[in-house]
Amino acid sequence: MEFSTFGDKFARYSGITQLMDDLNDGLRNPDAIMLGGGNPAQIPEMVEYFNQLCSQMAATGELTQALTNYDGPQGKNVFINALAQLLKSRYGWNISAKNIALTNGSQSAFFNLFNLLAGDFKNGTKKKILLPLAPEYIGYGDSGLSEKMFISYKPEISLLKNGLFKYHVDFNHLVVDNSIGAICASRPTNPTGNVLTNEEIHHLDQLAREHNIPLIIDNAYGMPFPDIIFEDVTPFWNDNTILCMSLSKLGLPGVRCGIVVASEEIATAIANMNGVLSLAPGSVGPAIGYKMIEQNDLMRLSEDVIKPFYLRKSKHAVEMLQQAITDSRFRIHKPEGAMFLWLWFKDLPISTMELYRRLKARGVLIVPGEYFFIGLDEDWQHGHECLRMNYVQEDEVMRKGIAIIAEEVERAYQEQ
Ligand code: PLP
């Protein structure tokens, strides 16, 4: 069948669709070692908490209420009000419910925001989304309605002690001009676990303000929830910032609840787009989120259960990797947050796309680095030398997966 230009672009098999397929296959195949996807961990305390909360909400009728009613296009009001209050009191941000709109997962918020702020404009100009530091989140890659919606820049790399390294925004090369419609960065970053410093965020904010464009901060892993952030940094928002949050990494990816905190103009635009695209965002996630705020559990569980769980897992995965792979060309990006480790095999004779195929044949799923350099205008060798590994599986599964990665990497290095 002949598809429209829109169909050609969105119905083709994109990187993100492949990733979600692999994730789904991995979840269905009990023998697969799934170090690829972005599914949050099944943290026993959280699973137990959600079981109890859902039973409680079923008993009071609140769950049925959420299941049997549409919310408005902005999303469930009680949750939005409670969240505005929480962010205001905790961080002193000058926001009200009018600054918030919900979406069906933050993934769909990014689609709407990118196409709202970049692409073709009435006066004939074209604008792009600037990703100041590649590698960036794979899910942005295919979301532009126009071709070449993204531009990104290579980072500065500092080599750290203990086999680690860290990326920094290379402000000397970053160009912001009137071809840029918005700046966007994930913090913590998927895939690297990097957390942009307060200075980097202030610098990006200043650049955005100077050019009268918004700064989008993807806070899917950040503060105040799910708080998978191991560095002492300050959350950031002002009326030129679009802060995107999600209930997914709290442990609720199935409810598909994204949260946009922005100026009233942007929040209203998102609510209007919701009306056209989905009538209203789903109600169950916000109903659960509201109960969690009401019972003072949202931040308590993020700080006391979720953050420590991921911190322990990440440290353990780094230890296991460094024991298994002793080649001095191997480095790990300093784990500062999110649920991934970003592994760099300098001078690897094969691409990580090839490594991905070899690992998949042995039942281990990772994501090759090549996917994450969205909008970079050169084929950078470094991108073929890195891969993303999720560290949320059980320790024994992690150990087996890492052993297979170590064998395949050693074999590949011998091929030169
Ligand atoms: N942003 C980042 C950085 C992510 O890693 C993800 C999911 O993995 C998303 C956004 C989208 O998450 P969701 O649509 O589940 O809110």
Image (spheres, rainbow, N blue to C red):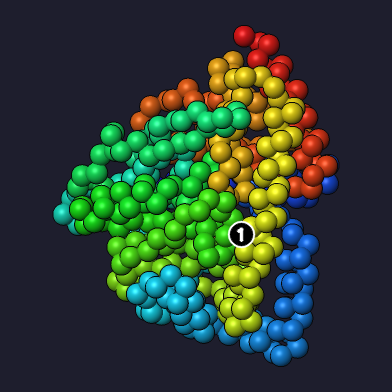
The foreground one among 211 and 365 is 211
Where residue 152 appears, as percent x and y from the top left, is 36, 39
Where residue 209 appears, as percent x and y from the top left, is 24, 56
Asked if disc 1 is less than 8 Å from ligand 1, the answer is yes
- The answer to whether residue 51 shows anywhere in this view is yes
Where residue 103 appears, as percent x and y from the top left, is 49, 68
Where residue 58 appears, as percent x and y from the top left, is 73, 84
- The answer to whether residue 107 shows anywhere in this view is no
Say if 155 sits above or below 125 in the image: above
Residue type at the position of mark 1: Lys
- Residue at 71% over, 40% down: 317
Report which residue position mark 1 lands on. 249
The foreground one among 316 and 102 is 316
- Residue at 47% over, 54% down: 233
In the current view of this chain or complex, which residue is farthest to the top? Answer: 416
Q: Quadrant of residue 193?
A: top right
Q: Quadrant of residue 288?
A: bottom right
